Amino acid sequence: MQSDLWKKFLKNRMAVAGSLLVFGLFFTAVFAPLLAPYEPTEIHLDRILAPPSAAHWFGTDQLGRDIFSRMIWGSRISLMVGFVSTGIAILIGTVLGALSGYYGRWLDPLVMRSVDIMLCFPTLFLILAVIAFLEPSIWNIMIIIGLTGWMGVTRLVRADFITLKERDFVLAAKAIGAGDLRVIFVHILPNAMASLLVAATFGVAGAILTESALSFLGIGVQPPMASWGNILTDGKDNIDIAWWLSLFPGLAILFTVLGYNLLGEGIRDTLDPRLKE
Amino acid sequence: MIRYILRRLAFMIPLLIGITIICFAVIHIAPGSPTDLQTQMNPRASAEAKERLRAMYDLDKPLYQQYLLWVGRLVRLDMGISFSQDHRPVADKILERIPITITLNVLSIALIMSVAIPIGILSAVRQNSLFDRLAGLFVFVGYSIPSFWLGLLLMILFGSWLGWLPISGIRSLNAEYLPPARAFLDLLSHLILPVFLLAFSGLAGLSRYMRSNMLEVIRQDYITTARAKGLSERTVIFKHALRNAMLPVITILGLSVPELIGGSVIFESIFVIPGMGQLFYGSVMARDYPVIMGILVIGAVLTLLGNLIADISYALADPRIRIS
């Protein structure tokens, strides 16, 4: 069974392409110190805004820092933001969705209305407003992206729970005396894993896009720490003279997000073909 | 129909209460009191600003009273005075910015519809054709591309290298002296890039959605009947299938309102467009709390209105909705 799934997964071109891109991100982030030719914050005042060359593949910025090296270190931010934010969103969404789907009664309308209310806010507005009251730091950003991203997961898990809780295997588990918590986490949740995994993969893609937009606006990762988004801010400031500052970090974001989206699509096709549109 | 609208309006009340509670929670989100934060975080904040903040949010009163007083003022559109140099009422500052933002959003929605719907139809009618595959690829890239980055690239290309389009503001410096037709073209040339970018991510989503709707509809019996009658494929698709496939699109457009309004923060600040998004961004950078809170509430209420309009249009278009 397991090896069948693997075979199916490896035959799916989208899944393989996505896995390779995501693996590339992991590899770059883990081995950043070995891969980067320069220190990410190393200033070279003699080669300010130098175009791409053999010494600086992706050129240098207004402080003469090597863009290639900054991007390699920036991959760590993207990797981390994706996992931490999505982890928070999945955790909240799973707990709320499971409880409201399983227990129903008064809890269900309460949770569903909370989802509706949260969906009324333009996410970017909510995130920016909270950041205005807190300090813009990588940790705050990750937490806030997570706290504003749980609504879709909640709906998904709730829907799975509503259909699964009536199934025979759940009734059987209850009949032999399994408690609510055991039924929820041991019997029902594993069956909701397929859709959860797909949602998580797409969630990572979304979180990386949001972080890059926030850093680009100057309210995300703060300089001198490098993130792909804040290198693009430098790109905007030097838009007439240094296209390389704008081009390369964006490509990195594009391919990373594309990787997670392809992977999500591949996992969906493999685990549950019915979920396909 | 009127009963449907009334029911729909009643449904909005708990959502409005929820929105105000969340906004209120944002004021109190910081550990300690918001005024402590104001002075610690922002050396520019004077003791006077601190005092004003304390008075404005009644921070010396119990929490529920603070909330009720705040909502009471909100209902009367009293959102306090901006912390910025102009000391103007927040409501005035926001209201004068709304028309530009709404114009941009409406134009983007129009663009999304006029491009995404034909793409979706064609992809569905010619499923798995080269066009369908290319459209699928476009959708994937559209979902994955950071649209602000696309904005930067287009600014470099059209603004810097080719010099075809202006990349900031909504009118040229000499716009006042231009004849009306030229002034209109001037405005148009300023709006092309922002509207395109704002629409971009919605385009991908809606075209894919339209495609799957259309695929579902053309498999139904009444379409087979229409074909069996010997109607031309054109009539079948445009007269019989399209209407039903279009319906759910209304809901999707309604749901995309918060994303569009959120996106206005990014594009209005990149292109220096004096709308609500730019005001919000500036206020966040300057920690102008009364304006931030005001826009947060208004942004959510605008979303609510967008959804309401979408639901009512849906009910107008589909009698099944308003009867059940």
Image (spheres, helix red, strand yellow):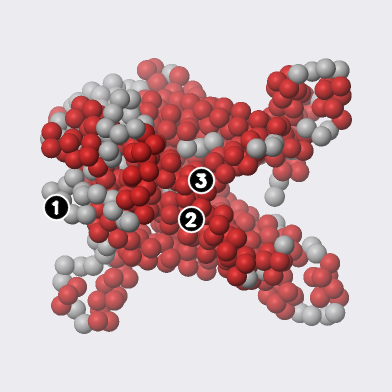
Q: Position of residue A202 (x, y in %)?
A: 57, 38
Q: Residues within 10 Å of mark 2 (few under 14, many from 20)?
A: many
- The amino acid on which the numbered mark 1 sits, given as a three-letter code, is Asp
Which quadrant of the structure image shows residue B162? bottom left
Is B9 in front, or is A3?
A: B9
Q: Is residue B100 left or right of residue A28?
A: left
Mark nearer the N terminus (1 vs 2): 1
- Is residue B57 shown to the viewer in this render? yes
- The amino acid on which the numbered mark 3 sits, given as a three-letter code, is Ile
Which mark, by number, is residue A117? 3
| Secondary structure beneath label 1 | loop
Which mark, by number, is residue B304? 2
| Secondary structure beneath label 3 | helix
- The amino acid on which the numbered mark 2 sits, given as a three-letter code, is Leu
Which quadrant of the structure image shows residue B76? bottom left
Which quadrant of the structure image shows residue A28? top left
Is B223 in front, or is B318?
A: B318
Q: Is residue B148 left or right of residue A193?
A: left
Q: Is residue A18 left or right of residue A49?
A: right
Which mark, by number, is residue B86? 1
Label 1 marks a residue whose chain is: B
